[in-house]
Image (cartoon, rainbow, N blue to C red):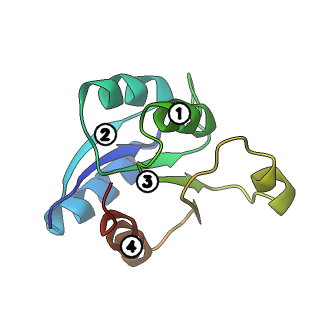
Amino acid sequence: MSKKILIVDDEEEIREVLGEYLAGLGHIFMEAENGEQAYEVFKENKFDLVISDINMPKMNGLKLLKLVKAIAPNLPVILTTGFELTKQEIRSLAVKPDAFVKKPFSLEYINYLIRAFCSKTI
């Protein structure tokens, strides 16, 4: 079943590769290059899933996560990062993502997460 996914990353290559992969699986996607742009896109559209980098200019993925969950608490949000997060850092988050994925990530693993999170009724 086709899902609508928001891809947020300041690296154009990651957005392109992930977008092509998702389109090949039959999903619809929109993209944004930072959290600020993503939030504007999010407010104007309905999504089944958000995949966002953490470290981005203008608004990082953690701030975006808080804003998205405030509006749509059941919407799955996957955060990606090239940096290692400690368990203490993860526990200290006021709002938790549905998954953390370390870069570089496997596209197959992203597909697994999409199927796992989007099979739930949102």
Label 1 vs label 3: CA separation?
13 Å
Residue on which disc 3 sits: 76
Query: Which badge, 4 or 1, is on the more N-terminal residue?
Result: 1
Q: Give the percent coordinates (x, y) of residue 122.
A: 33, 54
Tell me the tag on residue 116. Answer: 4
Q: Are marks 4 and 1 in contact (CB under 8 Å)?
A: no
Query: Which badge, 4 or 2, is on the more N-terminal residue?
Result: 2
Label 3 vs label 4: CA separation?
10 Å
Query: In the image, 86: left or right of 65?
Result: right
Q: Secondary structure at mark 1?
A: helix
Of badges 3 and 2, the one in the foreground is 3
Tell me the tag on residue 64. Answer: 1
Question: Which residue occupies the foreground of this view, 42 or 31?
Answer: 42
Q: Give the percent coordinates (x, y) of residue 71.
A: 44, 31
Is residue 38 depicted above or below 26 in this figure?
above
Q: Are marks 1 and 2 in contact (CB under 8 Å)?
A: no
Of badges 1 and 3, the one in the foreground is 3
Question: Which residue occupies the foreground of this view, 78 or 95?
Answer: 95
Q: Secondary structure at mark 4?
A: helix
Q: Which amino acid lies under the numbered mark 2 shown in the image of this protein?
A: Glu
